[in-house]
Image (tube, rainbow, N blue to C red):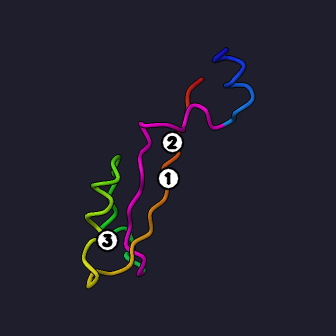
């Protein structure tokens, strides 16, 4: 069953509870202030203060070895 699901769902191996997210400032930071987080609580610490700058949050997709 899992093999069938995997063949029909291309992102099967990168979806789920083990996702890693890239959090980075949205103001041309040139690599400064980039963080990798794996929980919503950690991500929300970046945006909890309204006085802070804008952040971009993207799902990190690493290389998958099959």
Q: Residue at x 69, y 35 (%)?
A: 10
Residue 47 placed where, x, y %? Answer: 31, 71
Q: Which residues are magenta?
A: 11-27
Position of residue 51 in the picture relative to residue 27 (left or right): left
The residue under label 3 is 47
- The quarter of the picture where residue 17 lies is top left
Q: Nearer the viewer, mark 3 or mark 2?
A: 3
Tell me the number on the disc at residue 62.
Answer: 2
Q: Nearer the viewer, mark 1 or mark 2?
A: 1
Q: Residue at x 42, y 76 (%)?
A: 26
The residue under label 1 is 59
Above or below, 35 against 10 in this view is: below
Local packing at callout 1 (Cα closer than 10 Å; few below 14, some 14-19, many 20+) is: some
Q: Residue at x 48, y 49 (%)?
A: 60
Residue 6 placed where, x, y %? Answer: 67, 25
Q: Residue at x 41, y 46 (%)?
A: 20
The reply to whether callout 3 and callout 2 are in contact (CB within 8 Å) is no
Q: Secondary structure at mark 1?
A: strand
Above or below, 44 against 59 in this view is: below
What whole-number distance in Å separates the C-alpha atoms at marks 3 and 2?
25 Å
What whole-number distance in Å separates the C-alpha atoms at marks 1 and 3?
17 Å
The magenta stretch spans residue 13: yes
């Amino acid at each position: 069953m899992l093999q069938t699901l995997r063949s029909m769902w291309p992102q099967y191996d990168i979806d789920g509870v083990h996702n890693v997210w890239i959090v980075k400032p949205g103001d041309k930071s040139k690599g400064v202030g980039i963080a990798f987080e794996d929980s919503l609580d950690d991500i929300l610490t970046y945006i909890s203060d309204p006085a802070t700058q804008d952040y971009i949050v993207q799902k990190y997709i690493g290389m998958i070895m099959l």
